[in-house]
Amino acid sequence: MLLDTILFVVAEDSYFVSHRLHLAQHALDNGYRVVLITHGNKYKEIIEKKGINVYNWNINRSSINIILEVYSIVKLRQMIKDIRPKIVHAVAMKPVLYSSIACKGIDAIRCVFALGGLGFIFSSQKRYARFIRPLIIIALRYALSGKKNRLILQNIDDQHVIIRHRIIAEEQIRLIRGAGVNTSIFSPQPEAVGLPLVVLPGRMLWDKGIGDFVECARAIKAKGIAARFALVGDPDEHNPECVPRGQLEAWKKEGVVEWWGYCDDMPEVLRQAAIVCLPSYGEGLPKALLEAASCGRPIVTYDVSGCREVVVHERNGLLVPLKDGRALAAAVEKLLHDPELRMRMGRFGREMVIAEFAEERIARETMRVWEEVRG
């Protein structure tokens, strides 16, 4: 008997491994055949060892070359026809747009589209974002048309934006809060000895609040408070908000923060941390903060979409008004001075993640969407 195929379309194989591999494993465990279309070969062997067929797709997240983009869609459509999936599960803006266009006219395919966050185009007030936003809205309306399609969003604020712009009918939206956390791997450990470490885990983007974090570190150190501050992640050169490597190196040389670059052992990073601080300007639902909470680490973050879904103010962390540098520094300083408060917040965060954000729960909720569109 031929198994129904779920086809994941994801821009980069690294993202698939970190955010969607557990969903693919859940699909395999429930009798689906799983195929992945993605860019990059770094993790191909790891993925294929799970029993997932991988097709390479030459997509550039930042490209606006019309000829190359049309070719990407044509190539994607041909691969989809060859694979003949029952369900296409596309993740993030460009894969969602291109997959939906590529699937037009193929009646046997059901589409599930997942947006981890609405991203730079919807959050930024820069000229380029304001110019292209109406075009993206029109494109999304066309791409997501079709009553059998479903759109997965991660937070209620993004849902309100999608509904306000009439991109897809409300009854076709499913709210699934995050990508899930492996609570066995991300488990509580005692704080490391020595100076308390404040960590920002994420891509080095201005709209992740990298500059805000550096100024926070500078303000706290100017008071003579003993603490370390570390940026953990690499620049994303495909993103308009990318922090230049030269700037990161300059901060590191100045001594205001450490820059560790990309680390593939985040449980170890979080074991060393006393506090996790992500002053992002907006998220879908940040996996980095879920992992921090699962490890029993208190969080400081801005009171913005996505981040406020993870933090219950004064229970597992502190929410700070957007771009309020003084309040951000005060919140971090408060936790630095109170180890017992850090422990209490860490315990609450761990309990919350187990109850609401564990991988198993997210996988079950996603499976229900697949079964819904499958009919």
Image (tube, helix red, strand yellow):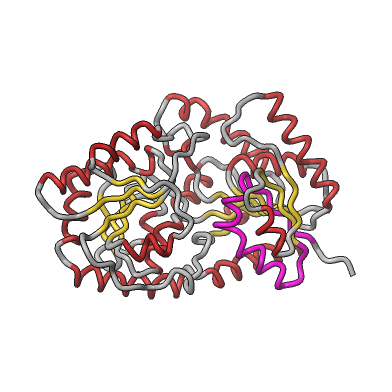
Expressed as whole percent of the image width and height from the top left, the position of residue 101 reads 73, 39
Q: Residue at x 44, y 39 (%)?
A: 235
Q: Quadrant of the C terminus?
A: bottom right
Magenta residue span: 5-33
For the image shown, how many numbered marks are present on the structure? 0
Q: Is residue 6 magenta?
A: yes
Q: Determine the image quadrant of residue 124.
A: top left
Q: Residue at x 55, y 57 (%)?
A: 18
Q: Residue at x 60, y 58 (%)?
A: 20
Is residue 148 something one can see in this rendering?
Answer: no
Expressed as whole percent of the image width and height from the top left, the position of residue 30 reads 72, 72
Q: Is residue 247 magenta?
A: no
Picture layout, residue 153 above or below residue 343:
above
Picture layout, residue 27 above or below residue 115:
below
Nearer to the camera, 218 or 323: 218
Expressed as whole percent of the image width and height from the top left, the position of residue 80 reads 80, 47
Locate residue 5 relative to residue 117 in the image: left or right.
right
Locate residue 4 relative to residue 340 in the image: left or right.
right
Q: Quadrant of the N terminus?
A: bottom right
Picture layout, residue 130 above or below residue 90:
above
Locate residue 105 relative to residue 213 in the image: left or right.
right
Locate residue 130 relative to residue 108 in the image: left or right.
left
